[in-house]
Amino acid sequence: MASFLVRNGLILAGLVLVPVFVGEFWAYQLGLYFLYALAAMGVGLIWGQAGILPLGQGMFVALAAYLAAYGLLGLGPSPLAYLIIPAACLAVALLGFVFAVTIFRGRLEQGPSFSLITLALTLAAFQIATTWSSVTGGFNGLRNIPGLPGLDGFLDLYYLIAVVLALAIATVDYLVRAPIGALWRAVADNERRLAFFGYDVAALKAVAFGVACGLAGLAGALYAPQQNLVTPDIAGFAFSGDLVIFAAAGGRAAVLGPVVGAIVVGVLSAELRGRFPWWEIAIALFFIVVVLRLPGGLMTLFAPLKRLRLARSPVPRPSQAPDKPRIATPLTVAFEEVCVRMGDVTILDGLSMQTGDEAVLCVIGPNGAGKTSALNVMTGALPKRGGRIVIDGVDVLRPQPAAVARSGVGRKFQTPSVFQKLTIDENLAIALWAGRWRGIDLLLPSLFGWTTPLLDEMRRRFEFMRSGAKPASDLSHGERQILELSMALLTEPRLLLLDEPCAGLSHEETAAVIDAIRWARHYLINLRIIIIEHDMELVRRLADRVVVLHQGRFLADGSVEEVQGNPDVRAVYVGGTR
Amino acid sequence: MTDVLFEIDRLSGGYGSGLVVRDVSIAVGRGKAVCLLGRNGVGKSTLVKLACGFLRPAGGTVRMAGREITGQQPSDNLSAGLTYCPQERVVFDDLTVAENLTLMRDSRRLDVFDPFFRVFPRFAERRRQHAGTLSGGEKKLLSFVRGLSEGGSMVVVDEPTEGVQFENVVRMADLIQSYKQTGMSFLVVEQNLTLVERIADHIVIMDHGEVVHSGDAANVARDKMIAYLTV
Amino acid sequence: MESLLITQAINAVYEILILAVLVLGLAVVMGLLNVLNIAHGEFVMLGAYCAYLVQKAGFPYLAAVPAAAIACGAIGLVVERFLIRPLRYDPFETLLATWGLGLLLRKLVEFGFGRGFRSVDIPVSGSISVFGEAYPIYRIVLMVISAAVLVLLFVWYARAPTGARIRAMVGNPVLAEAVGIKTRQLARNTFAAGTAWAGVAGVMIAPLTPVEPFMGLTLIVNSFFAVVVGGMGTVTGLFAGAGIIGGLQSVLSAAVSPNTAYLAMLLLSILFLWQRPRGLFPRS
């Protein structure tokens, strides 16, 4: 907390002191770039944190600017005019949120289509702003917009803008360091994995976009009184592109990056454009270089500053995480004649199998038997073409990953799937928060201190997890497998799906994992586990029951010995007559 | 001392930072077939991808006729005489059977493939069919024929009999035997003992990313192979 | 009235064919290589400037075709080497990098030629009577050339060995390497072919539109969204996209207003991007 206040206090002080150094006129000019910085911060948030490139933020700035213009023209000298700013900001933020949640709902990993939608929208907005003259004043825009009442001269408005910018920076700073910031970065890193923990990924993305639009709205609302003029230019894709360039040039992932980018690039451009015709060529080249080599942008120059500790950094106090609501009965799954096809290939060919009383069910079978596909279709990662999947007695028609996770299914994927760019601690925290957070918890940094006995046990067993500040990408393949397994266990699922938990692990690591699974089995009383494995060592030591799949169908089941002695099973593994 | 054509020497590697394959050594003599056995997930396919240039090895070397080819691009390895048939996505689904076969040839004529069509008659009927519509076994056959017809001296095949009918497995074995006579060498990753028993001169068994057994085919008992392959 | 309808119909066919020709380079690059080249319009612009220079230098107009192809192809090779390949052909990253590239090209041309419009004289002037209405000959020439080129190109892609190798590489890059296709070179050459073709398209439209540094911006919108709506990576997709977007623009422009046509096209694109992000006929 202390370092947060010091950091942002210094920024506020710096901004307020600027006119002392550059004079009144320059302060006024800078005001405009501060507004660009506000909008660019929004781009930095949605892009640098959540990994979604917005190509049309200009539209939201323009919308707020036009709204504010009307408000100011209407309310004139009344002090109510000040309400316009938060009103326009909220209106645009809400619009952005609703828009984003509609587009993102039900879709994972859309690729660049959202970016292209925002591009199309901003093109349309520009067109409408230019042609709908009766409302927008057409190409020439709305003119003679009064300033905010009570502010005289260049400086007053500057101070208002400076304070708003400082507050916005503080807000973004806070959000980035809050649990929600970690979740946004997890979205950018591995959306699918996050959905499988039960998080509403669409809502998370939409909140980020809503905040970004709120920042754009603030910028637009203040633009009207600052420039006293609102034209369609700001709705166009040139300005939207500029915002992206500011964020990229400054450093999209850093809080101050877009601010630095907007001010440096913006001011330099305005000044040097006239004097050096090749200035814009230089900017374009610089942008390309940033995309190719310097994703951290200009802020990488300030990287050494990061090590400067202005005050004590917040260390989260350990606290017991709230319990998850417990359902006493174990989760049952039944497949009835389930068929899955991908194009011409039949993956599951009338698969019928079900869980019983066993705690650990091992699913085995040769390549292409459909083991992973069975898990995929059960958790909604593959569409089902026929048959029924019954989870807990309920016929699940179209499973959604997040809903399945929330009903108590945990999953470890075949290839280790963790949040590579996040630290080990953040990875574990995200797994821990799933299903336990309430209300505004995701805004409270104290969540980083949550712990459970299970987490303590995992940290005790696996040493590498104690260096929690390391990024997960630094881990070896085996460590990543174990991390993902721990994360799945942390959600205290009723049914745990493990897909080749020991693939690529050394003997020692395999033994450690088997031990951990056994411990978890006894600690989490209701836990049922389905394991897909090829390592017979593991199957022998853990399985209560074994199911053999072959060519997308059930072949045999029984205890380990029964299955081993089954001639059909042997034949399938070593070939033979068909 | 048999003439070693293809030599994998203490090869290690994996995907990303993980070591899935550790210190594996295999030598294939001219005109011989080495079969690589092991359950799923032990690293057979990874080993073969490392050896043929699809993955960068973390350590070890690969030599072809004495010349080192470690880490070279697969298309360059092809010029050196190394043919590769993958385990998954074995044909070009969007191309017809005929296009799959003649893709890298100068001429589109199919008569060069007549000997193969004679061995696999059903297959010959499907010349103009899109390869994506073939069954899994038929795709494997197509991939196998393509591999043999490339005329390389060293053919590496990953699970050639997966989904293939018994009669055709026998025919594949016969083809391999006759090509061995002409000096072509084979490294075959397999789990199907029908094929292994007919063609293997030397057997290598892998488990947990390492070689656990390596010996002449005559000296490896069927039971031992089964023990390593099954549940 | 009837002749007016016929003229409208011919116009629509013209718009569709021209759009198909403009989009072709982008369809190749986006549909086959997954590269979102938002600077595509700038390559068309460069081709148009080539045509202007060739004409100004007194050479026959036809000479502009190889000139533009070579110039834009060469730039394409440089872009592939220094922008596309380092970014591993990733759609997002290439979108960003080519945004910067487009900016760069626009500014360079502005620096060299100034912002003003250049005009390129129509190489084949005059009009002939089509169903009683006068129709410019040059447009008819373009339609014929476009149709011929499109047909030839697609036959080539479907039949020729290189076409088969491109299809193989696009569908299964790992196996392509295994059978000996030098995928890096083939991808590079395909990209350069896409940009070269954009240049040639620029030569074709130069006499009909004001040639200025920002002309690419208006073109890219239609082109991009035509690829998105039609579907990436298939011949049918290209025709569907050009047909729908070009046809819609042409009909609505005439029936209502160009403004409405533009907005309708954007709305349609948004709907497609939302519900069918892969388009109508995507590569499976």
Image (tube, coloured by chain):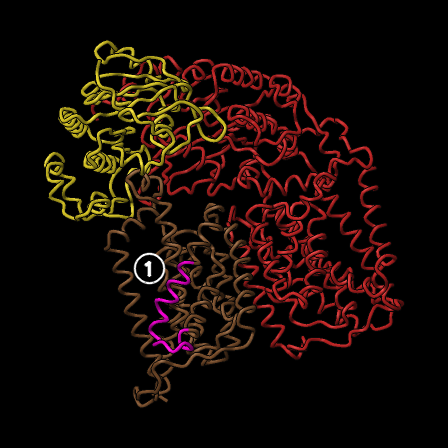
Q: Which chain is brown?
A: C
Q: Residue visible at 29% across and 41% down? A: C180
Q: Colour of chain B?
A: yellow
Report the magenta stretch's main SS. helix
- Which x, y percent locates residue A231? 68, 72
Q: Which chain is red?
A: A
* Residue type at tag 1: Val
- Which x, y percent locates residue B80? 27, 33
Can residue A274 be spotted in the picture? yes
Q: Is residue A89 above or below residue A315?
A: below
Q: Residue visible at 25% across and 20% down? A: B4
Q: Is residue A143 above or below residue A381?
A: below
- Which x, y percent locates residue A80? 85, 66
What is the chain identity of the residue bearing mark 1? C
- Closer to us: C17 or A304: A304
- Which x, y percent locates residue A45? 66, 49
In the image, the segment drawn in magenta is C54-74
- A492 horizontally vs B109: left or right: right
Q: Say which element carries label 1.
A: helix
Q: Which residue is mark 1?
A: C235
Q: Quadrant of residue A456?
A: top right
Q: Is residue C38 above or below residue C135?
A: above
